[in-house]
Each structure stands twice: as C-alpha cells, then as structure tokens.
Image (cartoon, rainbow, N blue to C red):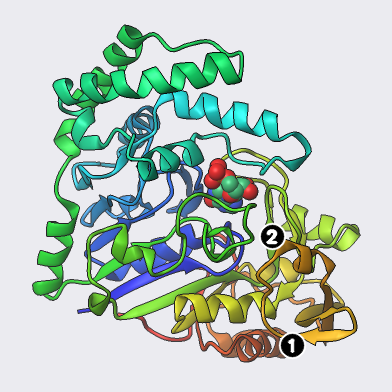
Amino acid sequence: MSTVVVIGAQWGDEGKGKVTDFLARGADIVVRYQGGNNAGHTVVADGQEYKLHLIPSGILHPEKLCLIGNGVVLDPEVFIGEVEGLSARGISTSNLKISPRAHVIMPYHLRIDACDEERRGANRIGTTGRGIGPAYADKAARAGIRVADLIDPESLAERLKIALEEKNAILTKLYGSQAFDFEAVYGTYKKYGERLAPFVSDVSILINEAIREGKNILFEGAQGTLLDIDHGTYPYVTSSHPVAGAACLGSGVGPTKIDKVIGVAKAYITRVGEGPFPTELKDETGERLRRRGHEFGTTTGRPRRCGWFDAVIARYAARINGLDYLAVTKLDVLTGLDRIKICTAYSYGGETVEEFPATLKVLSRCRPVYEEVPGWTEDISTVRKIEDLPVNAQNYLRRISQLSGVPLALAGVGPGRDQTLVIKELY
Ligand code: IMP
C-alpha cells in the first residue's frame, strides 16, 4: 500500500496533470483535494488530448475511483460540462464521486471575482475569474453553500436566501452591478443538484476504507506551492492550499496516513498573473521557452511568463511540502539552448539570500545569482532511460536535484504518457 501526494513545486502549471496521469497507472484511487476549475490539466493519452479543470486526471483510467474532496470548490455547471464532454468521447464517469462537504461556486462568486479585480485596478491579482477566491471567502465566513445543500432543495433555498441578501447588497451598492434573482438562481442550481446527486458520497470514508484495504492512493494537488494562500507570494496567490499538508485537510485523511510526497517542477519556471518573479526572462530566450513549451494557460489562454529554474524556490517547496522526490517536466523544451542558467541564490542589497523571502517587497528586489551549465542539441523526446540522455542533460537534471536537495523520481521529455523517464518506482 502506498499513499502518494503530488504537488506543484513552483507557481502552478508544472505539468502535474501528466505526472498524476502517469502515476495513476499504479493507483486505485485518485483524489483532488483543493482548488477548483482555476486549475487546468492537459493530458495526452493514446494520442488524444484532454483538457480537464475539475475532474481528477485519473478519470482517463476507467478502473480507477476518482474523488473530489471537501477541500475543492466546485462549479456545478463546469462539472456537468466536463462529465458530458468526457461521456461524448466515450470516457465513463461512473467511478467519479464528490464530497458532500465541498463548497459550491455560485454565479455571484464569478461576478464578485470580476468586480473585485476591476476595483483593484493596477493592484489586480490576475485571477482566473472562476469565482475561486469569493467561494473560499464565503467558506471561511461560514456563508457558503455546500454540495450537501445543493442536492437538498430545502437547504439550498434556505442558504441561497441568506447568501443573496448579502451578495445583492454588495453587488448593487458597492459595485453598481445587477442583483441576482432568487427564483432564477434557485431553479438552475436545483437542477444542477439533481444532476450531481448520484455522484455524491462521503469521500473521507471511501479513502480511509481503501487505506485499510491496502490500496494505492494518489492525491492530486492543483496550482503550486507559491500560489498557496499561506506559503505563497501573498497576495498574488490563490485562495486555497496547494501544499501537501492540504491533502489531509481537503480529503478527510490523517497525516499519519501519507507515505510519500512528490513535487513536480518544470526544468525551467513559469508564472501566470501578476507578482514578482526573480528569474523571469523578458527577452528572446523567454519567448523561445514560451513558444517551445506551449506556455499559454489551459484555463484562460493567457501567455505564461517564463524564466530559468530557480533552486531557491525548489528548496523552499522541498521544505514546505516535505518533498521525498522531484518529478522534473518539460526537459525537452530546453533542447537547443547553448547555455542554461540555474538560479542558486538571490542577491539582495549586497547580501546573498539562500531562503525564499516572506515579503514581496524583498522578493521584488532580489536579483538571481546564476550558475551556467552547457546545453544539448540532440532530440531527447524519444529517450526513455536517464542514462540514454545526452550527458549535459543528465548533468542538468542531477544539478537541479542536488541544488534542490531532493532526489529525482521522474523526468518528462514530451507531453505523451510514455515520454517519461522513471528514475524511482513510486508504488
Ligand atoms: P484564482 O485562483 O483564480 O483566484 O487566481 C489567483 C492566482 O492564482 C492568479 O495569479 C492565477 O493566475 C493563479 N492561478 C490559479 N490557478 C492556477 C493554475 O492552475 N495554474 C497557474 N496559476 C494559477
């Protein structure tokens, strides 16, 4: 038996979808435990591309149980759309379950997300506009609507009435926006509740039973460590906890039940949205990484900011998540670069900084200290063993693992399921 948590070790978009899809082969259950449809996973399976936002990427393996834990915020319209999209392509969703404790993203959350961003102006966060922050805010304010309410018309009516009183006041008085009509929202969401009801099950019970039976469980994190609301680059973060500890909270499993934590990191680094980014490349090399790495958001289509691998961030992710192993993705994107830079530390006011700073004020003034290594020109997309990689590519992988202080488990050389080098078996 093994329980494995996979998290993003950078700013999200590290290629977790591919890694989880690959690891899902050895798992009996795949669980999502935080975030919502702000996430976007592109998975290529049997030559077909699937873009998933909410449903765990394990869904492409028909025999796996796929669970959406209580820590997720669920937009029912998006969920139903994904279920229908998968069904239309012959992918069964009969093994998909949602926790009744998960919170629901309501239409006013989407509107408030947009209005908040507009109000922030130059200080906008650059959210995905999916209502994530406002939904988590309501959860913390004890004003949320949970899946259990959505599927119970009486509870839904009760909770929605209370919510709309407040939201309509905010929308009309603060933002000069339109109020939501109770009957219209209730009618639509009651129907969504009927569609969702067959999927609802106590996810915590299912996982804990499976752990007792010795099954393999994969916890699939969304976003990345630096987008964590506590440990990330606050306030340019998401409103949930992409770090490994959240796997327990967001699914109803005790910390003693987790065996391994894998951090996924790109061989370089990207970021979408606003906020400081020490190794950002605003030049031709950055443009090249974006083009070769197809660095455009799965959810919003926005171009991602690209930069060199940052070992300060990798060490920070190792500490915050307790990483056992690193999965490095998109190594092939670096092919053809003459020299590759790795950020080993920051320089701040003449001092060398080894640890990731707590404030944006300091981070924005940190300059990367680079080490340069030689690149490689050979096509590595067909390589399947680490020892078959060009020696400079092997050295690059070893060096980033060494600087991060985390051993390597996997390395990706292309988007396909089979384009993965296994350095350490994880089940
Ligand atoms: P929100 O999660 O939509 O509230 O957005 C907050 C911040 O997190 C923004 O900078 C987004 O670009 C970023 N973000 C949210 N989800 C993802 C993701 O899946 N990948 C990368 N960035 C994300």
Q: For the point 74% across and 87% down, which residue is it?
A: 392
Q: Quadrant of the C terminus?
A: bottom left
**Residue 281 left/right relative to 224:** right
**Does the Cβ of the disc 2 residue fall within 8 Å of ligand 1?**
no
Q: Position of residue 35 (x, y in %)?
A: 43, 49
Asked where in the image residue 194 lies, by quadrant, the reply is top left
| Category of crowding for the residue at label 1, using alpha-carbon neighbours closer than 10 angstroms: few (below 14), some (14–19), many (at least 20) | some
Q: Is residue 138 above or below residue 218?
A: above
Regarding residue 47, the answer to whether it shows in the image is no
Q: Secondary structure at mark 1?
A: helix
Per the model, the C-alpha gap separating discs 1 and 2 is 22 Å
Residue 307 horizontal/vertical position (percent): 77, 65
- Residue holding disc 1: 392
Please tell me whether mark 1 or mark 2 is closer to you in this view. 2
Give the amino acid type for the residue marked by disc 2 in the picture.
Answer: Thr
Quarter of the N terminus within the rendering: bottom left
Judge from the rendering whether residue 145 lies leftward or rightward of residue 359; answer left or right: left
Residue drawn at 25 percent across, 52 percent down: 67
- Residue at 29 percent of width and 71 percent of height: 26
Dot 2: element: strand
Q: Residue at x 61, y 26 (%)?
A: 115
Q: Name the disc covering residue 160, or none.
A: none
Q: Residue 103: which quarter of the image?
A: top left
Which residue does the numbered mark 2 point to in the structure image?
Answer: 270
Q: Is residue 381 left or right of residue 139?
A: right
Q: Is residue 34 above or below residue 173?
A: below
| Percent x, y of residue 101 | 23, 45
Q: Earlier in the sequence, mark 1 or mark 2?
A: 2
Give amino acid for label 1.
Answer: Asn
Residue 394 visible in the current orientation = yes
